[in-house]
Image: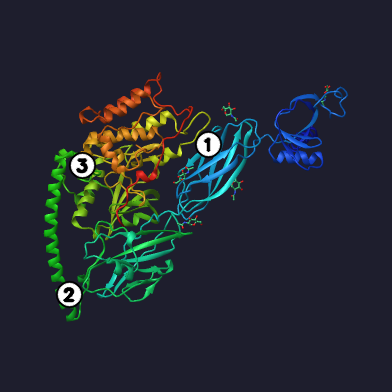
Amino acid sequence: MRSLSYVILFCTVCSIVCWNEGYFLGCYSNIPNVRTNIPSYSGQNNCIKACGSRYYRYAIPDTTCSCGNYEGEQVSNTTCNECQDCKDKEGILDIYATGNLLPGPPRNLRISNVTDTSLKISWSEPESFVELTSYKIRAKLLKTFSTFPPMSPEWVYSNKTFQTDIITLHPSSIYNLSITSVSPDGEGAAIYSDVKTEIGEPDNPPSPPELLSNDGSQIKIKMMAVTNNNGPVSAYRIVVVNNDVKESFNKDNLMSYDAAKRMGLTYYTAAELNPIEITKPFIVGDGRSYGGFYNPQLDPNVNYNIILGVVSRMGNETKICYSVPFSDTLVFKFSDEEGENSALIVVLSVAIGLLSCVLVASVIGFIILRNRVTNRRQRLSDNQELTLQGPMIEVENNGYIPEEEHVPINHYRSLRQKLQTFLPSQIKIDTSNLLGTGKFGRVNRANILNGDNLTPIAAYTIQDKKMGQETRKSMLQELDLLIKTGKHDNIIQLLGTCETPQTVIVALELVTTNLKEFLLGSRETLPERFSSLSEYQALDTAMQIAQGMAHLEHSKILHKQLCARSILLSNGVPKISGYGLAQYHSHNKIPDYTRWTAIEVFRGQPHNPKSDVWSFACLLWEICALGGTPYASVSNTNEIPEKIMRGLRLPQLQYFSEDLYQVMLDCWQIDTDERPKFEQLLEMLMALQENTFVPYLSFNLMANFQYEPFYPDIELAVRPNY
Ligand SMILES: *[C@@H]1O[C@H](CO)[C@@H](O)[C@H](O)[C@H]1NC(C)=O
Ligand SMILES: *[C@@H]1O[C@H](CO)[C@@H](O)[C@H](O)[C@H]1NC(C)=O
Ligand SMILES: *[C@@H]1O[C@H](CO)[C@@H](O)[C@H](O)[C@H]1NC(C)=O
Ligand SMILES: *[C@@H]1O[C@H](CO)[C@@H](O)[C@H](O)[C@H]1NC(C)=O
Ligand SMILES: *[C@@H]1O[C@H](CO)[C@@H](O)[C@H](O)[C@H]1NC(C)=O
């Protein structure tokens, strides 16, 4: 019994193997679509092999060798020679199966316009196939500088798509980009190519150097190495800025000391150091040359600011990123030094005297200037035409709804009563894993140790001791916003704080998926569809955000920067972020919110809860447009305010309903009283969702479908100098 089943098994295995290696089918006539002729072949086996390796189903070894995917009509199951009845039939040929059922690789793979995060790709149909359902694109990461492994994304496109933009790649990385065609019988062979994305600007600005000693003409500093996820760390640069001159520092004008002197600039590059030298203390002003830059003696009568830059080079591209001065820049004050000899003390006193004069002068100057600015602002709000000049800067950005003008400034003691506090030993910060940079410091991935439990968090490290009074006040106000928010499923949560002698660490809920990137990543054309996101998911996400916003409004908090980039996704649940202290960005991706800003704000009026409603509708549009850029046709963001005041609104897209668009239009009413509140918005969206007769949104492919364009550059702010 058992041996019989072995025999059966053996035969099954044999027939599969035999099938795979090609076998004789019979004598056929009317064979259609003979696709190719294999030149100079010898023997039928070679013909079968040649056709199989070209992904054809059938081989026809005659005087020439042809391959095809359709067999025609069977005349006989013997060869045409052995067939008795076939002698007088015409066009009969012996056909062999190659054993291949899968489509061949797509052809003409073309990759163009490669940037640091995107590229264009095009391809054409495979040479050999019977039926295709879709194309699958994979970007497999082969090499990267990133310490966190970026994803190896995949997309599926319909069998009618032959080009697309790939937009979520990582800079300075090598990907194996491949395309396969998928048929009902399975996935076919791949065509592939390695692509190297361009170098990105270093994502991790160095910390400002630390002062070790200062003897007037020489300043000894200590520096910290940085990690860079966007490219190699090739060198460090030390930049000296004369801090007494109120000349604005422009990193694009940086040059060597001599060249700067000739140009009359008061800042220069003093040294370029090899990365291995960075851990050693460095003396600014030692009169030597470093990496082609002269490091001259300093003037003892000048206050200097020293900036550290990290240089990343790949091929002929160089990107440099300088230490971010957090509110209070590190100024090497001459008076910091404890002078021991009396001459020094005399010099010191004179210097301090001079400085005080300068200080008094600048305070007076500041007061005059401020009065002028205030006057100008008043004039501006009298005259709307003038406010067209640029986006709003006039608004005091404290995020509170105006009725609550007098916000008590909480001090740490009262903070401690409201918040969980952690011991420094409980928090383990992963310094090589920077999530972003905020106004007051860096935000790193970290873990909180609670008993035996490790909870991953986002740790915002605030250099509290280096902060000026005003900066601390605004920091506490922003922290207070998060405290006031309390807990809500759709809002990023403040977990607690931790104080160390030098810093305050604010622990925030760790969520790393951003709605904007999620939406862009969902752009793929499956058979009949153009997004992997469902319509229900899209509207549901918007509704949950509306719930979170309703909660913020109840807590009397204005968001002011609502857009898809401000929303994080934790297992599909949207969490509102990007307000108060919960604001941090990869340093070269600071969003410009102009395209989401309400009309009254352009007119110089303060933000109010209905301004957030306006922004919410832009966000709703952004969700429906799968991450498309609002007003993409207006590439100059400075023109947006004027165009909106003249009536420009985001358009209704082909694939969302009149009713859904009407909800957006309601939110874009000029009169804020006519805009719905978030609670009403929720009801309106729910009504759309419950009305099963009219689909509110459809991600089904339609003729001439095109994605809404996405232009990362015009959604990002032009960065301030250094
Ligand atoms: C071949 O065809 C004949 C009739 O056309 C049939 O009787 C015979 O069973 C077939 N043989 C095989 C192996 O299929
Ligand atoms: C590639 O980029 C250039 C310049 O940015 C542009 O002119 C060209 O149209 C782009 N090519 C494609 C295929 O989009
Ligand atoms: C593409 O897919 C459609 C249906 O999904 C099918 O009717 C059509 O034949 C396919 N085209 C090719 C070239 O396979
Ligand atoms: C790239 O991917 C294709 C398909 O997945 C694979 O066949 C090929 O070996 C890969 N090439 C490299 C260099 O990894
Ligand atoms: C950099 O080098 C590439 C070829 O390696 C060249 O195509 C490109 O024009 C160069 N760019 C600059 C700015 O020199």
- Name the disc covering residue 156, or none: 1
Real-space Cα distance between discs 2 and 1? 70 Å
- x and y percent of residue 562 in the render? 30, 39
> Helix or strand or loop: what does disc 3 sit on?
helix
Q: Amino acid at mark 3?
A: Thr
69 shown above or below 392 = above
Q: Amino acid at mark 1?
A: Val
Whether residue 240 is visible: no
Real-space Cα distance between discs 3 and 1? 46 Å
Check disc 3 and report the residue beneath it: 387
> Helix or strand or loop: what does disc 2 sit on?
helix
Nearer-N-terminus badge (3/1): 1
- x and y percent of residue 715 in the render? 35, 43
Q: Is mark 2 within 8 Å of ligand 5?
A: no
Residue 6 is drawn in which quadrant?
top right
Nearer-N-terminus badge (3/2): 2
Mark 3–mark 2 CB contact (< 8 Å):
no
Residue 424 is drawn in which quadrant?
bottom left
Q: Residues within 10 Å of mark 3 (few under 14, many from 20)?
A: many
- Name the disc covering residue 348, or none: 2
- Taking the spot 42% from the left edge, 39% from the top edge, the residue there is 518
Name the mark nearer the viewer: 3 or 1.
3
> Helix or strand or loop: what does disc 1 sit on?
strand
Q: Would residue 549 be found to the left or right of residue 311 on screen?
A: left
